[in-house]
Structure formats: structure tokens, C-alpha cells
Image (cartoon, grey):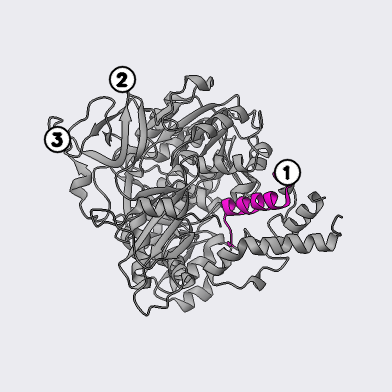
Amino acid sequence: MSLNMKDKERQIYDHIIFLLHSRLNMLGMDKSTIHPDYDLLKTGLLDSMSFVNLVTAMEKKFNVSIDFELLFEAPEFSRVKELVKVFAANIK
Amino acid sequence: MPIINKTIKLLIDAFIHSWNNFSDRTALDVKNVSYTYNDLYKIAGGISNCIKKRSSSEDKLIGILADRSITAYSGILGILLSGKGYVPFNKNFPVLRTLSMIELSQVKTIIVGEECIEYLEECLKTISSDKCFLMPDKHNSAPLKKKYPRHQFIMLTSPVPGNEPIELPSVDGDSIAYLLFTSGSTGVPKGVAITNKNVSSFLNYLSTKYHFDKTDRFFQISELTFDLSVQDLFLCWMSGACLCVSNDTSTVTIAKFIKEKKITSWFSVPSVAVLLSKMRLLKSNTFPLLKYSMFCGEVLPERIAQEWQSAAPNSTLINFYGPTEGTISITHYEWKKDSETNHCLNGIVPIGTIFETQEFCILDELNKPVATGEKGELCIRGTQVISKYFSSVPNQNDIFIKIQGQGENTWYKTGDLVTSNQNNIIYYLGRKDSQVKIKGYRVELGEIDYVIRIAATTDMIATITQNNPDGTADKILSFVVRQKDSTISEADIIKECMIKLPKYMIPDKIFFLDGMPLNSNGKIDRQRLTNEFKYEG
């Protein structure tokens, strides 16, 4: 049975928070900071390499392969909601 | 109009050469605005005139706090045109570090870009001596003047009009062209002053060895506080080519930029290529227009060289090596397209042969030359190599040495362990101390320990790097044994690091241990820490 869109997006969002858990802890930040509009790169929470590591860890978890070239077409690709959208569109 | 041969004596000559020959060609593409050599010359001329009016002839250095803007590039040229050397500051560095760099360099005048005003305001709260800030022409400095009356805030003058002549500098080759700071294990950055003679020697060699011309488009990625940027700017301008600056400071979108701007010359640290590889963006023939692919600053994994060559099949791939003290790079290795014929060691591309204009030797622990094929410390000398640090550094006499039987020449001991073969090809093997390269930046792990030691009030600290499978350093891990009753947390330590260290030096993870593992000599067993602790975050 496949997940409906809302459940899928919730699951992706939760996994992003899970992957960021250690980083947030280290910076003394609360997970509630990571709202859908939060920009992972522009806020400086992640650098380029950590951002790519996050995306590849999510690919592994959801067993999908993201086209990075397409991902970067979105002007705000490093916002949480944009990542959620891209993964939701790729997960069957 | 002065005519300058392509062999240059001063860093500014590289630009003047192309201004003389290609004045209407595009020199700079920044924030999607193009500037010809003449446009840039006039803007820089205005800045130069302003500097001459405002600074004393005794001030040999001018600071520049600007980032990826027309002020950044014209500011550097303006400083050089005025006969001074430039000291770049970085808005991404903690304020405390920048203050320390201002203090050590003793600059009295600093050019400020619009994009750095907010950061300047933070610095102004603690700058201790009177300074003169050259501000962007549209900026209203009245509130700053009122708040900080001890400093001067002067508007940068407009470009020089029409055909008004600009006097070229009359300094000699021993004058400083730029001053950079590298990590120092005592917590104080080390100043490396590169003279016009040092950098001219470097550029003259590269421009003769390789073939760049006015049709080339150079990619500018390195920050101005990193010496790779000097090659980006001046090799480009010496060739009459166009320097393309990405708006986006994030490296993830680079591949798109390279294609859009039709870049022909790439120069970066290998970490950027590793990132593109991770994103699966190094597919066959992705960058067909690249003519030169140049890497420097850290080890280049063989796998990445192969992937890159396949993605940029029409380019000559060169692996450069050099410490800041040797002016950007001093050895080179041209990757052979038939990768079978490259003799890599431990999966790492050789750093190659010394530039034909410089010298090297490999010494043992007693400073005696080793036999060919033996391991030892790489030492360099020549017109590119400095003979002392700008500021006082402990044990300088152990770093800049005379070698028995080699006359009065001063050699720089790089701290890099290497070996060489009968063709004088040099292979990098590692460091003899705790200096590492993180994303190309030189980092003394001792400097991180120093900051943590003060924050955690304990001496039981160790910092190591966690490497990628390719051998490039990926993460910084610090280990702390807390004092009894100490409640200091990981977040407390990181907060302190963020105040004192640049982002690339902040540990990715702090582990709290009950006791530090020691080896049989009673020293901290770093190998055991490396083997037992991994961080995947």
C-alpha cells in the first residue's frame, strides 16, 4: 500500500529532523527551529558538503535517487519544504 | 601609455599588461554585470587616488573587507596601483579573528564593500586603534561617524574620468604584494607576506608554461583570504581573459555556473570535485569547454582525477602543490589522459616536479638530504619562497633554515613528508606535525585544542580528523576529558569555537571521555581515537 501525499511528506520531514538531530544538539538548537521555510544552507546550519550528505542519507533511507541538477533548478532548493517536495515526488 | 612586457615585475603589471592590449575586452563578470579592462582600470584608478590622498607613504599595507563584489576586485587593483600591498579580511570569519588580523597587520586604512557593512559594524565595537575606512560611494556613513568619532569614514571616490592619467607605482620587487594569515598552533594567526618578486616569479612561470589567452574564461571560487584566489585573479588578467564570479556562495550549484558562463579554466581545491562527484555531476563530457582543470590545496585522490578527466575530456588536468610560504604553488603534475600511465601512490595523485625556476630537497630528521626513494621532509627555496614570517612566530629558525653544504641560501621546511623517484617526481605522504587541510584550508589542530582548552578549562583534549575513503579530511572530531564537577556541554564548547575560529575549523563533533587513551610513551593515542570513533552526522 502506498502512502498518501500528506503522510509521505510528514515521514520525509521527520527524517530530515532525525538526520539533523545531532547537529542541532551540538549547536544547542531546538528541533522546532526547523520549520518548512527554514533554509539549511543560507542559515549556515549546513555547509555544502553536509547538505549533500543529508540528501544522500535520505536517498538511502527512501531508496530513491535524486537528480541533483534538477534539484538545483528550484530557486530555493535548500529550504526544508523544497527538499520534502522533491523527495515526495520521487518516492513511490 | 606605459607598455609592459608579459614578463612582470609587480603584481599590478599583470593587469596593466592586458589593459594596454585588450582594454575593451571583458575583464570581470560579477553579479551578472560585465566590466571591461578599461572600466576596471578607471574604477581602480579612483580607489588608488583616494588611497594616495588618505594614507601616509609609510603605510605599506591597506586592508580590504569585501566579498564577491566590484569593490572587492577593483579594491585590490586600486591598492596595488597605489603602490601598497593588500590584506584581505573575511566577513565569514569570527570578528575576534579579523580583529587579530587587523592588529597584526597594523593596517590603518581599510576598503569596505557594501556587502560587509553589517560585519564592519560588529568589528567597530572592539577595534582598538583609530582607522580610516573607505566606504562605498552610496553608503550613508553619518550614523557610523557619529557613533565612532575616533575613526574616519571616507567615501571612495568615483572612477577617474576620461583620459586622466593614473600614475603607476614606483615600488620595487621586495615590497609586499599581499599579506595572508594562516592557522597558528598558539592561537595567533601567522602572517605570510608575499612580495611582488615572489608572486611575479610565480605568474611568469605559469603564464609561460601553460597557454591561456584573451578568449579564456576563468572561474573564481576561492575566498580572497585564501591564496588560490591570487592565481584566479591575476593569471586571468595577465592573459587578457575574463574572471567570472559566482553570485552564489554555496558550492553545490557550481556545475550549473560552469556551464552557463562557458568557463574554460577551473582552479579549486579537490574537495569541490569530491562534492561534485558525490552529487553524481561528474558524468562523461559534462564540461566539454574546460581547457585547464587545476587543483591545489590538499591531496587529489586518483579516483577523482579519473572522474574529472572523463567529465572534462578536453582539458589538461594539473595537480599543483605549494604552501602559502612558497606563493600559491611550487610543484605540478600533469595528469596523463591514459590513466594507466599515472603512477599514483596510495591512491593519491603525485604532487609532481618542482617548478623549473625553484629548488627542492628532501631532508631527514637531522636536516641531511635523504637518498632518492627515501621518505623525508620537503624543503623548498627560490624566488617564490619567503624567508621569514611577517609577525613573530615561535621557532622560526627551525622552519627557515640553512643547509650544510648549500651556502647561505634560506630554505623553508614545509612540514610535509614526501618521497621522490629518479625523475624527481614528488609524492606526498603526510604531515610530520598536527597540521591538516580541511577543504583546502590549512588548519593547526593545536589551534582548535587551544580554544577548547580555554573553554573547558582542561588540558585533556585531542582533536583529530576523520577522512573520506579517498584520504581527504572530511570531519573534525574533538575529545575532551572534563574536569571533575564540570558541567560544560558540547553546545557550550561549540559556541566558544564559533566566537574564535573560522567555520572550517569548528569541530563536527565533541566526544566527552572519562579518560584519554595513551600510548606506551604516555602520549595521547590519536591512532586509537581514529580507529575507535566515527561520526556520521
* Magenta-colored span: A44-68
- Helix, strand, or loop for circle 2? loop
Q: Earlier in the sequence, mark 3 or mark 2?
A: 3
Q: Is residue B240 visible?
A: no
Residue A45 x, y percent position in the rendering: 58, 62
Q: Amino acid at mark 3?
A: Glu
Image mark for residue B126: none
Residue pictured at 55% horizontal, 51% vertical = B68
Outermost residue to the bottom: B485
Q: Quadrant location of residue B326? A: top left
Image mark for residue B422: 2
**What chain is tagged by disc 2?**
B
- Helix, strand, or loop for circle 1? loop
Residue pictured at 52% horizontal, 46% vertical = B42
Q: Is residue B534 magenta?
A: no
Q: Is A32 left, or right, of B507 in this rendering? A: right
Residue B418 x, y percent position in the rendering: 32, 34
Q: Is residue B465 visible?
A: yes
- Helix, strand, or loop for circle 3? loop
Cβ atoms under marks 3 and 1 closer than 8 Å: no
Total label count? 3
Q: Magenta region, mostly helix, strand or loop?
A: helix
The front one of B225 and B146 is: B225
Residue pictured at 73% horizontal, 63% vertical = A13
Residue annotated with mark 1: A67
Residue pictured at 60% horizontal, 51% vertical = A53
Q: Amino acid at mark 1?
A: Asp
Q: In whole angstroms, how far apart are the C-alphas of marks 3 and 2?
A: 27 Å
Image mark for residue B408: 3
Q: Quadrant location of residue B454? A: bottom left
**What chain is tagged by disc 1?**
A
Q: In whole angstroms, how far apart are the C-alphas of marks 2 and 1?
A: 46 Å
